[in-house]
Image (cartoon, helix red, strand yellow):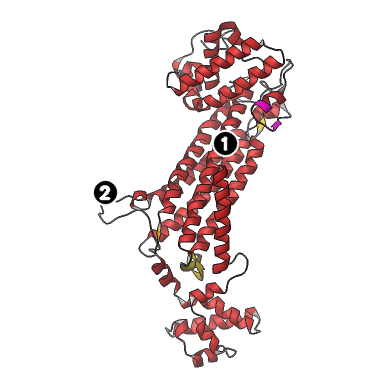
Amino acid sequence: MALWGGRFSGVQKKELIEFTESVSFDKRFYRHDIAGSKAHVEMLASCRIIPPKTASAIKAELDRIQKRIEGGKFEFKSELEDIHMHIESEIIRALGDEGARLHTARSRNDQVNLDTRLYLRDETAKILAGIANLQKALVFQAEKNSGAIMPGYTHLQHAQPILFAHHLLAYVEMFNRDTTRLQDCLKRINVMTLGSGAIAGTTLPIDRKKTAAALSFPAISANSMDAVADRDFECEFLACLAIFAMHVSRLSEDIVLWMSKEFSFVELADAFCTGSSLMPQKKNPDVAELARGKTGRMYGNLMAILTICKGLPMSYNRDLQEDKEPLFDSIDTVLKILSVFPPMIATMEARKDRMLAAANNPELMATDLAEELVRNGMPFRKAHERTGSLVKWCNANRTPLDKISFEDMKRIIPEADKSLLNIFDPAKSISKREIAGGTGPRQVRSQTNSWKRKLQDKLQRA
Ligand code: ARG
């Protein structure tokens, strides 16, 4: 029998029950629902709204329910709709009228909001630890391959030589922004909404700050209508995950390219690849491809929540129950990605010989040549044009840039001196880029060390 038996009668039809239930997915809130109920009854007792003995009995029963759920001995049935009703019904079944005091000054509207916040707090901690691990794997590779030189690309065309470590650390920076974005989002998740009731609070003299303190919330919500209607924190959280996934997807795309025959810059461990059922020679980077594909789903989840909320009149509407599956799906997906990416990255083999061979294209140093002319006093636009003409001449005469004779060079760049013939070495090019944020070896080493320290601290604290 549903808990609103006083107002409704008759047996709900099976199809209706199946349509409205959420316990099949929101049962994952059980720990948070129980923690919230324990804090709630403690507060009710301390405000003399329920007897202390009742609060103790309810808390003990909540602990027993938690044990039963964790031991697989608790039965979930769609008739009881959601996790909140399952737990409350069980309390009433065990404690009778005393149990019927649990839902005093509370509604499922504020309860579900609180549970979601408690749950997201826990999941955020897991995700942050996972991101730090992923960064650690990237930093490990940056250190292991600190001298590896590769071509840097823009438009997927050879641009300038860079250190492989610099490329990897670019992702460490992106993942750092993802971390700080989630930490910022956590501030808005971390608000205690219980006590908002169904919409307008309660006439009973509750102390919401007490509940907040018991559940380690630094703040309570200021408007009961806003509190039960608000899912901004979920939109924001899913946006954070979508941006993180976008970064993972770009890294995946790089890995897929690097794994191709044409690049052959890295080799992934067999454990992270699969073969083809048809082509015996194949070794496919499926993990990276799947992460790239799953990113699409995670954008979909963000769109789902935004769309669910956009047309809702104030305040709570049942539509909001639809927030959970996209939310859970994105969290599960991110945690799955974070369980396979760190070991995949850590075991990746960089093929430095292949990278260097690709970087040994003198055209990658064309900018260096122009900048050398600038160093000798020429305005940059003019130097750019002169160098462009040189590249054009070399292409037309099928002469690699570094094989041009000084006489030919002099004809195209009258200001040239012989030192220009010696700049076509990618290692030299990189060593000249020691500006802050540049790909110079000292810069990159100091970035690598600084990340190593920061991540060590973070992972120790986690
Ligand atoms: N299962 C519901 C949800 O997820 C809980 C709140 C239900 N409130 C209500 N008045 N029916 O949103």
Mark 2 crowdedness (10 Å alpha carbons): few <14, some 14-19, many ≥20: few
Disc 1 is placed on an element classified as: helix
| Quadrant of the drawing holding the C terminus | top right
Marks 1 and 2, the one that precedes in the sequence:
2
Q: In this view, does 91 lie above or below 138?
A: above
Q: In this view, does 296 lie above or below 217?
A: below
* Disc on res. 305: 1
Disc 2 is placed on an element classified as: loop
* Disc on res. 418: none
User: Which residue occupies the foreground of this view, 373 or 453?
Assistant: 453
Residue 358 visible in rendering: yes
At x 26%, y 48%, the residue is 277
Residue 232: x and y in percent read 64, 36
Q: Is residue 283 left or right of residue 65?
A: left
How many angstroms separate mark 1 from mark 2 (CA)? 39 Å
- Total numbered circles: 2
Q: In this view, does 241 lie to the left or right of 265?
A: right
At x 56%, y 89%, the residue is 417
Residue 310: x and y in percent read 62, 35
Q: Is residue 212 left or right of residue 76?
A: right
Q: Which amino acid does label 1 sit on?
A: Ile
Mark 1 crowdedness (10 Å alpha carbons): few <14, some 14-19, many ≥20: many
| Residue linked to disc 2 | 277
Which span of residues is magenta-colored?
Answer: 213-219
Question: Mark 1 CB in 8 Å range of ligand 1?
Answer: no
At x 57%, y 24%, the residue is 33
Q: In this view, does 443 lie above or below 82?
A: below
User: Which residue occupies the foreground of this view, 263 or 295?
Assistant: 263
Residue 441 location, quadrant: bottom right
Residue 384 visible in rendering: no
